[in-house]
Image (tube, rainbow, N blue to C red):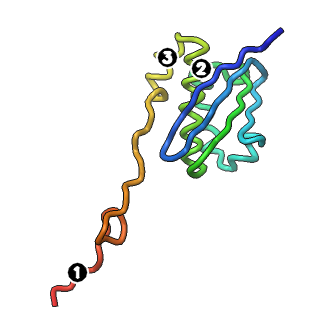
Amino acid sequence: MATTKHYATGKRKTSIAKVYLSAGNGKVIVNSRSLEVYFTSEFQRQDIMLPLTVTGTLGTYDIKVMALGGGKSGQAGAMRLGIARALMTINEEFRPMLRAVGLTTRDPRMVERKKCGRKKARKRFQFSKR
């Protein structure tokens, strides 16, 4: 029996998460490590698993993720979006549930670039009148 894998990509800030969902018992592997080893923060782990808890499919799919770029927070957000998109490819009836919680929207916020003549994007050098 061939197991079908469902693929989706999630993005957040500069992070990209390539998510593969397959039927299983709820094992999550991130960059060849378990979820608990890769994400030490309990809040981030709950945030990642939110699409599965909303749809009631927690423990029914094995998840394999390749997370690239950014930091842990951005990767967690990218994984959450990728899992939500992969669940929608499995069953289109999950879309209204995920949309009601706001899991189908990509977060557009990015780091603002540094401007010339300034210390950072908006911070300026100290002004001296005299």
**Residue 5's x, y, as percent?**
70, 19
The amino acid at mark 1 is Phe
The answer to whether residue 47 shows anywhere in this view is no
- Judge left or right: residue 122 versus residue 32: left
| Residue at mark 1 | 127
| Residue at mark 3 | 95
Of helix, strand and loop, which one carries label 1? loop
Q: Is residue 32 above or below residue 52?
A: below
The N terminus - image quarter: top right
- Choose top left, top right, bottom left or bottom right for residue 65: top right
Mark 2–mark 3 Cα distance, whole angstroms, equals 8 Å
Q: Number of marks in the image?
A: 3
Mark 1–mark 3 Cα distance, whole angstroms, equals 52 Å
The amino acid at mark 3 is Arg
Q: Which label's residue is closer to the chain start, 1 or 2?
A: 2
The amino acid at mark 2 is Leu
- Choose top left, top right, bottom left or bottom right for residue 53: top right
| Residue at mark 2 | 87
Q: Is residue 128 above or below residue 3?
A: below
**Residue 41's x, y, as percent?**
65, 49
Residue shown at the point (49%, 18%) measured from the top left: 97
